[in-house]
Image (cartoon, helix red, strand yellow):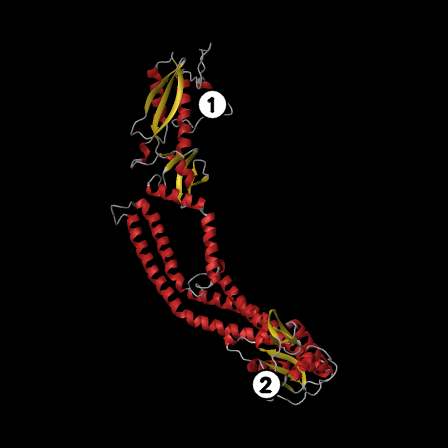
Amino acid sequence: MTAFPASALALCLALAAGAGAAAQPREAPPPSADASVAAPIPMEASREPFTLTFANRPIVVLRARVLGRSPGERAEGAGRVLDDLVARRVTAPVAWRPFQDGALVTVAERAVVMLTTGEVDELLGETIDAAAEQTVARLRQALDEAVEARTPGMLLRSAALAGMGFAVGLFAVWGIARTHRAASNKLVTVAEQTVTRSGLADLHSLRASRLLEFERRFVTVVAVGLALVVTYATATFVLRRFPYTRPWGESMRAFLLASTEQLALQIVHAVPGLFSVLLICIVARFTVRLIRMWFNAVERGTVTPRWIYPETAQPTRRLLTALVWITVVVMAYPYLPGSQTEAFKGVSVILGLMVTFGSSGIVNQIMSGFMITYSRALRLGDFVRIGDVEGTVTQLGVLSTKVRTLQREEVTIPNAVVVGQTTTDYSRYRDAQSTLTPTSVTIGYDAPWRQVQSLLLLAAERTSGIQREPAPIVLQTALQDFYVSYTLFVCLESQESRLTTLHALHAHIQDLFNEYGVQIMSPNYLTDPAAPKVVARRDWFAAPARPDPSPQDGV
């Protein structure tokens, strides 16, 4: 190609900037000197690059200030030239001509844009020639589409094709919805018939399970995925029918192909890592099964190691199982797909911070649970008093302890509260019923203490639910100013029946003391009344009371 002299280049630059946009450029004089001796074009790098866009297509990125004009001004001038050419239906030929340190892109011998060395990155291997060739190719396509956008016949044809494509896509989505309903019902019917014939479960149990719901959701997910694919393809097809939206449709198709290719490559590259994760999980699963078998044997008493007790076998097994799976996560983390990406690392950091700042209370409860378990302070089935709560221990959890009270209420106590309270265990010893349960009365000094003691022991003898061995005992626990405090200690056969047993015992105490004329002056005794405060036997069953069916029990 023939090089331009400096005077011709200055003229072309003026034309490219928009000066004299309506007139054709004057013919340049024949070159009078070689390009190597031509004066260089004033050019400097710009901090504000600008993309020359025409007909909704990017043509070239301008990064240099030429003859004092910024990249934006250069792009604006080139756009005016292209609009004028398309309005006059002059769109060919599109070519480029080299000059010193640059290239001039022309349309029908009219200067459009000048490319300089400031537009290319030589460190990346870019050249002026390659940039000019690419600019010419993009400009040709943009000019053809600009002409097409101003041709009514071609637009009508594009609209008809877009309408047909939209109708086909809508019909496909409708067909997927119909097929989804039919396939879901058919799959459920086949599953019910298969399970019923095989005898694995009856029809009611199958419908009560979540298997059928899982099948329906699986079919729904497949149908939604197919509908999304059809919608995406339809949108791509419709957008590519019109010149202005064609770049968007092409970018959607390119994005889908690139994403599919990238996903396939990631799956292929992730196979070795997933195999390693699978191998780690298999080894961990085998180890967990061995741990479960051994600790179950300890809990049953078939294995008796010295360093662990049967009541601590289950929590120890859970603790070791958790440690095994935590180790699995740590070992498998580097092999997980995407584990080295910044997004994955960011999510890991966020989860770590959430656990760190939000789990202080949970960690306190867990450590308290370990203290309760390994100190053997409580056991399942023990009848205990924790603070003001009295009942049977039904669950020793990681975070809390559950107690069933005598009123058949289930009370949940946080482990930290259990550790901080005074706990009384009535079932600690091997002979759980050896625990003494007290009940007290206060009697005046005029009553013989031997008589009072005999009456209390007789009341205990008449009450069912009280053990005969060890025998009940009566102690004078206090000598007050006006009365003596007597305490009867008995051993209950079952702590669960404490309320009913004490009720029967108190009833027998009242009946016997009334029968023998001994006054019960609880809780305070100040002076002797004029008449004895006893209930005559004839009034024991005053209306509306009725005689007891079992006089021995007195209740």
Query: What crowding class fits label 1: few (fewer than 14 Cα within 10 Å), some (14-19), or many (20 or more)?
Result: few
The residue lying at 42 percent from left, 31 percent from top is 499
* C-beta proximity under 8 Å, tags 1 and 2: no
Of residues 458 and 328, the one nearer the viewer is 328
Amino acid type shown at disc 2: Ala
Of residues 121 and 148, the one nearer the viewer is 121
Image position, residue 396 (x, y; %): 39, 44
| Above/below status of 156 relative to 484 | below
Image quarter of residue 328: bottom left
Image quarter of residue 554: top left
Image position, residue 496 (x, y; %): 39, 36
Q: Which residue is mark 1?
A: 541
Horizontal arrangement in the rendering, residue 303 relative to residue 479 (left or right):
left
Q: Which residue is mark 2?
A: 35
In the rendered image, the quadrant that contains the C terminus is top left
Image position, residue 415 (x, y; %): 41, 41
| Above/below status of 439 relative to 103 | above
Determine the residue located farthest toward the bottom in the rendered image: 30
Determine the residue located farthest toward the top in the rendered image: 530
Tag 1's secondary structure? Answer: loop
In the rendered image, the quadrant that contains the N terminus is bottom right
Q: Earlier in the sequence, mark 1 or mark 2?
A: 2
Determine the residue located farthest toward the right in the rendered image: 22
